[in-house]
Image (cartoon, rainbow, N blue to C red):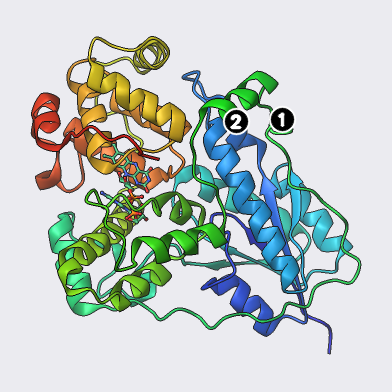
Amino acid sequence: MAKKVILIWFRNDLRIHDNEILFEAVHKGNIVIPVYFFDPRYFKSNKLGLQNTGILRAKFLIESVQQLKDNLHDLGADLLVFQGKPEDILGTLCAKYEVTEVYHHREVAHRETKISERVETALWKEKINLKHFIGHTLYHKEDLPIPIKDIPDSFSAFKKKVEKESFVRPVLPTIEKIVTHPHLEVTQVPTLEDLGFSPTDIQNIYLNSDTLKGGEDNALKIIDMTLSPHHDDVDDYNLVSPFIAVGAVSPAYYYHKIKAAQVPAYKKKYEKLISRLLWRDYFRFMLKKHPNIFFKNHQPDLDIIASSKVLQHMISNGTDELVINEMFEEIKRTGNLPYEYREILAAYLTQTAAVNHLAGANLFEEFLIDYAPATTYGYWLHVAGFGTSAKDNTSSSWQDLVKKNYKVRSTAK
Ligand SMILES: Cc1cc2nc3c(=O)[nH]c(=O)nc-3n(C[C@H](O)[C@H](O)[C@H](O)COP(=O)(O)OP(=O)(O)OC[C@H]3O[C@@H](n4cnc5c(N)ncnc54)[C@H](O)[C@@H]3O)c2cc1C
């Protein structure tokens, strides 16, 4: 019988644990070839003059990919890493290694699904099937009690329904060994410079930034630390979201860890963490249900290019509001902000600076290390008053949000 050679196209699923495509490839394939692409489309500026991937997220991504490469190596395999468009490279790779099937996780936003379509077309010419998996959410699409088109728009109705009528799948068993091609080419993870960042910007982030280190091992360590009975963070600022965004940790893994945590005094905290994971699912399913709402301009009277110029001026020169400047500084230094501060910043920008919600979301896309299209664009809609869960639109002024949620913090990452 002919050998089954399965190529795994890693995207935002940069982990070994609980990874259905890797698990299935290892069990069904005789040879498994893991591949990752640094796609140039994600490393250029957009028409607003903002970068699709800012330097802090690029650094986090490089670290996550390097860690996956190291972890695959420990299991007997490797990760082939290329700079280029997957649709331009995959066909040649498949021919070279006699690949019989390609696996990948389906994404939800337009840019990502378009890339999958191009890859599918390119592979089709080689008569190779691209097998799609769905695996980014806490609740698997197949286990939802209703089709996505019937999911209630109200977040609380969605939460009630899935929690009552569905379940979270158990984490997949650990992979012990991977058999790969004996003569794989040698590839390296690119540096920030290879990705087009300037030496000055690179030096600057190493001197002045304070970011999380990417990668699966660090993700699992942070989860264990923040769920430990001795961890006492009043803000519940857990810092798992950047890892979930690149798939260095699976939502189900995090969920089952939270469920297994047993400190009765933290019951409310555990519920809050699970509810956050559900908000993430909610946005992904809503983006699928309402593909035309998330990226639509709901404020045509606010010019997007002009808004972007205002934003760029503010982020470089500051505003008259100290609290807002502090948040800009934190986002520039860490690529992160707690939820409450993101809401304050977005409310300030939409209410006082008359910034168009799409320009605001683009700014977050450049700067946040946990950027995820559905969540960023979904929240900006809510802050601007056009959210899919209308009851959850921001209704307070940014000053009231500051009074309610702002505290001075010194060690925020
Ligand atoms: C304008 C705006 C834009 C945002 N953009 C993003 C984004 O691009 N990516 C992103 O992951 N989150 C986004 N959020 C949600 C939220 O601010 C972050 O997820 C949160 O700050 C992460 O904190 P943490 O690391 O402590 O959460 P953790 O507890 O570590 O997060 C665990 C998981 O829950 C999700 N999560 C946590 N809080 C929320 C929340 N309030 N709503 C939805 N999901 C949540 C995280 O994505 C992660 O998957 C945005 C919020 C606002 C107001």
Q: Is residue 129 left or right of residue 143?
A: right
Task: Please name whichever residue, 264 or 38, is drawn nearer the observer in this view of the structure.
Answer: 264
Q: Nearer the viewer, residue 121 or 1?
A: 1
Residue on which the image places disc 2: 206
> Is 81 rendered above or below residue 96?
above
Residue 140 lies, in percent from the top left, at: 38, 71
Q: Which residue is mark 1?
A: 193
Horizontally, residue 91 falls left or right of residue 52, namely right
Q: Amino acid at mark 1?
A: Glu
Element type at mark 2: helix
Q: How many marks?
A: 2
Mark 2 close to ligand 1, CB under 8 Å: no
Front residue of 51/295: it is 51
Which of marks 1 and 2 precedes in the sequence? 1
Residue 302: quadrant of the picture: top left
Label 1 secondary element: loop
Pick the quarter of the image with the C terminus.
Answer: top left
To which quarter of the image does residue 262 belong?
A: bottom left
Does the image show residue 362? no
Q: Amino acid at mark 2?
A: Tyr
Query: How far apart in space, not on screen, are marks 2 and 1 (Cα)?
Result: 13 Å
Q: Residue, x 40% and y 62% (percent of image)? A: 225
Q: Which mark is residue 331?
A: none
> Where is 45 relative to 285, above or below?
above
> From the Cβ of disc 1, is ligand 1 less than 8 Å away?
no
